[in-house]
Every structure is written in C-alpha cells, then in structure tokens.
Image (cartoon, helix red, strand yellow):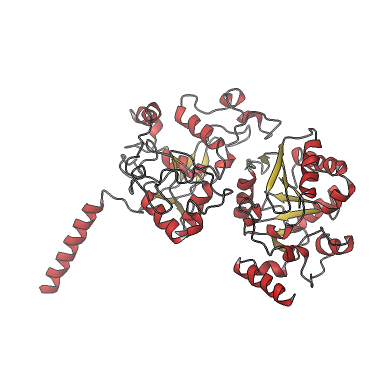
Amino acid sequence: MKTQFALVLSLLAAAGLARAADAPACCAVEKPAAAKDACCAAEAPKPAVAPCCAEEKATAPLTARSIYQLESRFTDDAGRSAQLTSLRGQPVMLAMFFASCEYACPVLVSDIQRLRAELPAAVREKSRVVLVSFDTARDTPAALKAYRERMKLDGAWTLLHGDAASVQELAMLLGVKYKQDARGQFSHSNLITVLNPEGEITHQRAGLMGDVSELAKAVVLVAAAK
Amino acid sequence: MRPLLRSFAIAALALCAGVARAEDLGERMVRIPAGTYAPLIRGADEAERVPVAAFLLDARPVTNAEFLEFVRAHPKWQRSRVSPLFADHGYLGDWAGDLELGARAPAGAPVVRVSWFAARAFAAVRGKRLPTTAEWERAAAAGFTTADGATEPGFAATVLAWYTKPSPTALPAAGSGRANSLGAHDLHGLVWEWVDDFNTAMVTGESRGDTGLERTLFCGAGAAGARDLTNYPAFMRVGFRSSLRANYAVPNLGFRCAQSISP
C-alpha cells in the first residue's frame, strides 16, 4: 500500500504534477458530502491534509483526448490554485463566462441550473460544474466569490480564474471563441461542454435557453460509464 | 599591417557570407514599427483603427527544416506521437515520416499542416510567440514600395493573383516571394498563416447559437458592417480564420513567429 502511494507520488512528480499534490483537489465521487465541502466549498479554505481522490486516481496516465493534459494552473474563488487534472474522476459540466456579463452568462448559468435539475439526484451529487472566466483582469478570485454569492451557486460549482494564456488555451481546446470589445465586454460563444471522468469531451451544446435534455443525457451517460 | 589585413579579410568574408545568405533569410526578424490596424469587420462601438505597438516579425514563414529540428528535440510533437487534442490526423501530412521530409515537403518550403498548438509550442521554444491578428494584418497591409498597400498601384492585383491559382504540390521556398516595404516576405501569395487569436474571428451561421454579435454574421449583416467591401483577400482571411479549430492541421496553413519589443 505504501509503495503504491510512493509510486503514485513519483508518477505525479514525473508528470510534472508534483505541485498538484499540495493543491486541494475538487473531487466528489467516493467522498461523503462533508469531505467534498472541505475540498471545494468557497467558505471552507481548510488545508487538505490527506490526499484527495483525484490524486489517488491519477495513477493511470491521462488519455490522449483528455483536456486535463493542459498543465496550466487556475485559481478558484477561495484562492486555491490547482491544475484541471484535479477535476479527474467525476462528470464535469464546463462553461466559460465572465462575471460582469449582463446578458448571455446569467442565461448560461440558469441553463446549467436547469440541466442539473434534470439530473437524477445521484448523478447530480457526483458531478461538478466548472465555470472559467475569460475576463482575466477583472474576474479575480474575490470577484468570482462575489459572483458565487450573487448567483447563489452551491458547493458543486467551481469558479476559476486563470492567466490570459491559460484561459486562451482552454478556450482553444473547447472551441470557445471570445473577443473583448471597446467597452470591456466580451462577445463569446455560449458553449456547455460535458467531460467524462477522464476529462474527455463527450458532448457540447452551443446556444442559450434551449432544451437541456440532451446535455442531461450526456451527463448521465458519462456518470454511468466506468 | 598584418592585423589590419586580417581584419580586412574577415570583413570581406563576412560580406561574402552576407551576400550568399541573402537568399536564405534564416530566422531573421524584421521590426514592424508601431502603426494601426483597421479591422475589416468591427462592432458598433469599436474604433475604426486599432493601435498596434512596434514588434518583431519573422521575415518569412517557418520552414519544414526548422520544424523538423523542433520535433526532433520535442518528440511529443512528432506525427505519430502527438495527441489528437493538439493536432488532428492531417498533422504534418506532407512529410514522408515522423522525422523524414520527403519530396512533397522540401526543406526550405514553409511547413504546413501544423496546428495552432504545435505552432505555438515551436514559437515558445524560441522565446517567441505567434503574431496577433492585429499585428499580422498591420504587417501585411504594407505595400511592396509604400507603407499602404491599399493605395499602391498593382499591389491588390498581385495579392489577389494567389487566389486565382491552385497551390503546387510542393510549395516554393519560404522567403522567395518579394519583400514588402517592411522587409517581410510572403505575407501574401505563399500560405495562410496562423495568428495567436484566430478564435476572435467570429463568423457564424447562427447568432443565437454561438455569439451575441450579429453584426459579425457573414454574407448578411457581416458584410454590411465591413469597412472595405472591395478587399476580397481580407474577407477570405476572416472567413478562413473563423473556420479553424486550434487542432486543425490543414494544407497551405503555416505560420511565422513574432516577438514583443520590450519598452
């Protein structure tokens, strides 16, 4: 068991992920709700002592289509820094947005809320919503924390801030287009992406206010696959 | 006297080398002075001209030989090893093998069928980056003999000529085209080139489905908002860029690197 753990650590180090070990991983799969909260909720910045399930699962190398190959680090709204690979092991609904968006993003958020409401409770509990801001200047962790409060987003939501290059790279992988206009507003794709536990894109929906049942089906599908 | 003679000889040699090398621009960069870029299509409240700071730009596109050297040093970018996420199945498709160029990819020809991710990784290794759309367009707007190609007689026709003929199987050498007035070769007439922010070109089939900017819709509202309806190549570039995904590796799409000038 110990050697296994050492092996995991050395694998992590080899993959250049050594620092991920001290970053709290957001994982919800086999952990009880309390543990999940300790890991992920905004108001619980407890240091993670025991390795989270994400690290335990990181034994196998990432698949060729896993977007968790991105090595850049993001910071959540509690100020914790982590790589996307810490999301490994659970279904993820991922969208890009910016907090001062007046039109599309609130709709995008409410679409995801409708989507979550359509999920069976068991799937809803073990899946995670991740919002990544392309407003790298204004959407600091503190601004994202205020957004979480304003939009009443619970612990299942992770809000991420990254530097311009990391955000651009993620957008490129997802196929999200965005452009800041003269007023500082962004025109952007409205894209919801479903990731399986390995971080592979299994479904995407472009648009707003449409039917979310296809998305819900996709989440259920990746939650069922092992 | 002797040392003087020697330095003469060295100077002469250097001069010869300089002349001999004039054909191959190597990885020389040219300084693009500060200027402006006039986007073909812009939002309602966007400025007509966007300022572009001075920067350095490769004098010609990156060649197969240079890219070969890169994948040799960075095996994860070799054809058989690259992740499909970062380069699709067409990646380096003209090459004979992982580390072999072959007849369809002459060493001095621009490398094509490279993804945005691969181009960016190549640039990063050299301490460079990809030019932005604004930078690329600012450099490409220069004429052959004047600062503004749009008003230079014959320039537009020369640029347009490329679109009228199919590309040869093996591309001509990078840098073989006539330099523009800023010293940059082949910005027109050889290959398409990646720009760092190609994903800001939002031309879409369905505004509700994708973005909120209906004015950038093509054919309809898009063209109505365009600055210059006669600039066919500019339309082509906007359309082309908006059709790309970052892992696409398509024929005739290469790149060159840029570098910021620290103030």
Where residue A7 appears, x then y in whole percent? 67, 72
Quadrant including the N terminus of chain B:
bottom left
Q: How many marks?
A: 0
- Nearer to me, B78 or A21: B78
Question: Where A25 falls versus A212 (above or below)?
Answer: below
Relative to B2, is A189 on the left or the right? right
- On the question of residue A180 being in view, the answer is no
Indicate the quadrant where residue B197 lies.
top right
Question: Where A179 falls versus A91 (above or below)?
Answer: above
Where residue B85 appears, x then y in whole percent? 59, 48
- On the question of residue B87 being in view, the answer is yes
Where residue B163 appears, x then y in whole percent? 40, 29
Relative to A44, is B206 on the left or the right? left
Where residue B111 appears, x then y in whole percent? 41, 46
Residue drawn 70% across and 55% down?
Answer: A161
Residue drawn 77% across and 64% down?
Answer: A53
